[in-house]
């Protein structure tokens, strides 16, 4: 009898507005309160059961043995501090579920979620929002067509594609997972960021809402106006404008490409560093550089490489390998884009046709000249060339001219214990196919060379002094000397030549300093990277 009366009153109440109730409705409400056990109103738990705060109309119905409450107009529900608003809803008390329709809105602390339709389970506190879904907090807005939201731990996820809107960027993905307590959103599959300063595509990305830091995993590509970055992992702090990229990173900034196992970059001031496996290449200049540590500054185009750096300069038929304690590259000035390369301390050079050492050097692409300072030495085959300062000019990817300033000295082995020698204040050498072809000695020229008879036996030493002289080479050996301006020449038979006259003053044969192979140049760098 109690249930029949309650059911009758419930069916009748669909005709009544709750905010303008009649005497009959008041009686119905009294009856409901009195016979509460049949509707479980008296046993509601604010944390477990969904409570009705307001509705313009309500109706009770039973379908298939399940009892429903139909709420219509300005519906307001509550559970555990989370509010639900909608145009209409169907509540199922036994299962503690709600189906909501029209202008659906959830408000929980700083989180708001809206949709056209909602399916909610009060026991699991899991809501499924469908169609025109938005989820917002104080720092971001999420849009999707279907969202699962857990009111218990304030987490959410979508599996059908969605986007997160920020002030300066939009993040889209096929899947997304939101964690309110951590202020984090995980994006999976076809992740795309469209920012005012860059565009990013990735497999997986974690975004922290409070710190504005994006952490990306898997294949990631970042585009901006100047360059394209390829990496497998890294992070970007949008607030500080700082980024870090992990192993296998490639930065393509035509005509230059930079690679590294780890790259740290401050975009706000154009500074970056590569602490391991640095590799840089310029396709226009055909120059590359490797090192175990490097720093670069974009605005000034300045690059500094240390920890066994090696520069590789492509020649016509070979490459010139250069190493030093520090290698640097920069533009001549802000307005002049001519590239300059510098090597500081313990410079060593190797190519198949030429090797060299010095303390410091620099190379300018304006005149294609290597300038070598402080005890520079070059070897062309077995011929040793030294001076206080030396300039080596490259033309069409081949050695073209060598200028030796102050204390120039050329030594060419001539047998087991003899050396042909030329010295002078300044010496200018000219190359043909990367081999010495002729040499011009200017001021205080001296020469000493050893003659042989038809049986290839040494017969004596020819020593000459002259203001200037010309020397010719054939098959990488001295073949002819031409003296200018009345030379003083003297021939001494070998048997009468004292040992101290076998060499000119300041003679130094330094073959032990000669780099032996490109592997020797690369050895320390290679060992470091293994």
Image (cartoon, helix red, strand yellow):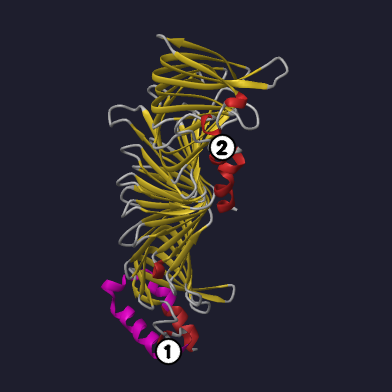
Give the mark, 2 or 1, whose residue is nearer the N terminus: 1
Can you say whether 435 is above or below 499 in the image? above
**Residue 23 drawn in magenta:** yes
Say whether residue 319 is visible: yes
Q: Secondary structure at mark 1?
A: loop
Instruction: Give the left or right position of residue 109, taking residue 387 as reference.
Output: left
Residue ID at (32%, 71%): 109
Q: Whole-percent x and y of residue 30?
A: 34, 86
Q: Whole-percent x and y of residue 502?
A: 54, 30
Most extreme residue toward the top, as rendered?
A: 485
Can you say whether 453 is above or below 234 in the image? above
**Residue 26 drawn in magenta:** yes
Say whether residue 104 is visible: no
**Corner quadrant of residue 136:** bottom left
Label 2 and label 1: CA atoms lie apart by: 111 Å
Residues 409 and 105: in front is 409
Find disc 1 in the rendering and name its residue. Answer: 35
Q: Specify the segment rendered in magenta.
A: 10-37
Residues 264 and 88: in front is 264
Q: Main structural element of the magenta stretch: helix, strand or loop?
A: helix
Label for residue 511? 2
Q: Whole-percent x and y of residue 312?
A: 52, 35
Residue ID at (62%, 32%): 417
Residues 106 and 35: in front is 106
Q: How many marks?
A: 2
Can you say whether 190 is above or below 430 in the image? below
Residue ID at (61%, 38%): 517
* Crowd band around label 2 with a 10 angstrom C-alpha radius: few (<14), some (14–19), many (20+): few
Instruction: Give the left or right position of residue 265, taking residue 336 as reference.
Output: right
* Crowd band around label 1 with a 10 angstrom C-alpha radius: few (<14), some (14–19), many (20+): some
Q: Whole-percent x and y of residue 510?
A: 53, 38
């Amino acid at each position: 009898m109690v249930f029949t009366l309650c059911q009758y009153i419930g069916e009748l109440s669909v005709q009544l507005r709750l905010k303008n109730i009649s005497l009959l409705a008041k009686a119905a409400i009294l009856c409901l309160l009195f016979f509460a056990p049949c509707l479980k109103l008296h046993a509601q738990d604010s944390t477990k059961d969904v409570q009705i705060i307001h509705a313009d109309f309500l109706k009770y119905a039973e379908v298939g043995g399940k009892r429903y409450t139909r709420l219509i107009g300005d519906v307001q529900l509550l559970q555990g501090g989370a509010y639900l608003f909608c145009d209409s809803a169907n509540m199922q008390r036994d299962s503690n579920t709600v189906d909501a329709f029209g202008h659906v809105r959830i408000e929980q602390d700083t989180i708001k979620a809206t949709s056209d339709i909602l399916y909610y389970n009060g026991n699991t506190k899991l809501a499924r929002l469908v169609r025109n879904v938005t989820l917002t907090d104080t720092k971001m807005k999420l849009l999707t067509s279907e969202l699962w939201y857990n009111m218990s731990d304030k987490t959410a996820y979508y599996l059908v594609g969605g986007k997160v809107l920020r002030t300066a960027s939009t993040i889209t993905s096929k899947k997304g997972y939101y964690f309110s307590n951590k202020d984090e959103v995980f994006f999976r599959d076809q992740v795309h960021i469209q920012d005012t300063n860059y565009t990013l595509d990735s497999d997986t990305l974690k975004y922290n809402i409070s710190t504005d830091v994006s952490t990306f995993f898997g294949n990631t590509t970042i585009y901006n106006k100047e360059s394209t970055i390829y990496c497998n992992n890294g992070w970007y702090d949008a607030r500080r404008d700082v980024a870090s990229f992990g192993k296998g990173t490639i930065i393509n900034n035509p005509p230059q490409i930079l690679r590294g196992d780890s790259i740290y970059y401050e975009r706000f001031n154009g500074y970056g560093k590569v602490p391991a496996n640095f590799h840089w290449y310029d396709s226009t200049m055909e120059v590359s550089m490797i090192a175990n540590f490097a720093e670069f500054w974009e605005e000034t185009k300045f690059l500094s490489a240390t920890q066994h750096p090696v520069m590789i300069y492509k020649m016509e038929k070979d490459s010139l390998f250069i190493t030093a304690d520090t290698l640097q590259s920069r533009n001549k000035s802000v307005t002049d884009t001519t590239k300059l390369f510098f090597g500081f301390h313990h410079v060593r050079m190797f190519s198949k046709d030429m090797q060299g050492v010095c303390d410091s050097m620099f190379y300018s692409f304006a005149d294609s000249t290597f300038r070598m300072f402080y005890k520079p030495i070059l070897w062309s085959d077995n011929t040793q060339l030294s001076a206080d300062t030396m300039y080596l000019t490259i033309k069409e990817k081949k050695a073209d001219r060598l200028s030796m300033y102050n204390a120039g000295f050329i030594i060419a082995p001539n047998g087991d214990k003899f050396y042909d020698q030329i010295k002078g204040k300044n010496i200018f050498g000219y190359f043909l196919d990367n081999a010495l072809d002729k040499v011009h000695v200017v001021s205080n020229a001296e020469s000493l060379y050893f003659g042989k008879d038809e049986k290839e036996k040494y017969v004596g030493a020819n020593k000459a002094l002259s203001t200037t002289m010309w020397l010719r080479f054939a098959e990488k050996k001295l073949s002819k000397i031409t003296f200018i301006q009345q030379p003083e020449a003297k021939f001494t038979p070998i048997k009468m030549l004292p040992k101290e006259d076998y060499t000119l003053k300041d003679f130094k044969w330094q073959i032990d300093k000669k780099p032996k192979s490109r592997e020797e140049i690369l050895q320390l760098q290679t060992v470091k990277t293994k």
